[in-house]
Image: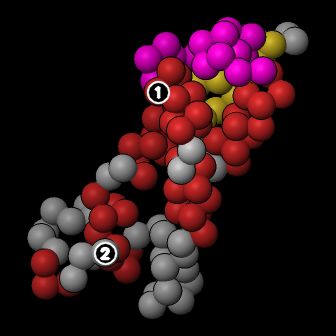
């Protein structure tokens, strides 16, 4: 049932869209989508290698990585002086799952599989 979804606020009749807004804004950029794609293909990637892969200066790359990190779409692990980035598969799969789609379905169209 929809009311059991974690995206609902304490008031059962209101959906908290702020997390989705942040994530979709992060996705609404071609360079960030390219970064996510490369992380999907390569797994954990050092920022030094990512600069060459996406062909962008480190300052601009850092800006895009921060937006993706704030949206929880990627993760960061620091090893020594280098930062390694990886796609947050759990969060991306949740964002692209029926959970979000379920919010926009009319209740008479929801199957028993919806939002399970």
Residue 37 is labelled as 1
> Pointer 2: residues within 10 angstroms few (<14), some, or many (20+)?
few
Magenta residue check for 49: yes
Q: Which residue is mark 2?
A: 104
Do the residues bearing badges 2 and 1 touch, measured as CB atoms within 8 Å? no
Query: Residue 63 versus residue 87: which sits nearer the camera?
Result: 63
Residue 10 against residue 116 in the figure, above or below: below
Q: State which region is magenta.
A: 40-57
> Please, which residue is most extreme toward the right here?
81
Give how far across and how far down residue 98 sits, in percent.
Answer: 28, 58
**Main SS, magenta residues:** helix
Label 1: few (<14), some or many (≥20) within 10 Å?
few
Left or right: where 114 falls relative to 6 = left
- Answer above or below: position of 45 versus 7: above
Observer-nearest of 15 and 1: 15
Q: Nearer the viewer, mark 2 or mark 1?
A: 1
Residue at position x 54%, y 75% from top? 16
| Quarter of the N terminus within the rendering | bottom left
Q: Does residue 54 show up?
A: yes
Quarter in which the C terminus is drawn: bottom left
Residue 38 x, y percent position in the rendering: 50, 21
Q: SS of the residue at dot 1?
A: helix
Q: How far across and down, in percent of the image, does residue 40 sit?
A: 45, 24
Q: Residue at x 85, y 10 (%)?
A: 80
| Mark 2 residue element | loop
- Residue at horizontal 21%, vertical 65%? 114
Which disc is residue 78 wearing?
Answer: none
Residue 88 visible within the image:
no
């Amino acid at each position: 049932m929809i009311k059991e979804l974690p995206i609902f606020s304490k008031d059962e009749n209101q959906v908290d869209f702020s997390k989705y807004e942040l994530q979709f804004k992060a996705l609404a950029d071609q360079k960030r989508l390219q970064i996510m794609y490369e992380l999907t293909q390569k797994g954990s990637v050092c920022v030094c290698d990512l600069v060459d892969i996406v062909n962008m200066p480190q300052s601009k790359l850092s800006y895009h990585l921060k937006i993706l990190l704030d949206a929880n779409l990627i993760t960061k692990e620091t090893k020594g002086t280098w930062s390694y980035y990886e796609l947050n598969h759990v969060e991306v799969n949740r964002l692209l799952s029926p959970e979000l789609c379920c919010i926009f379905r009319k209740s008479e169209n929801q199957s028993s599989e919806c939002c399970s």
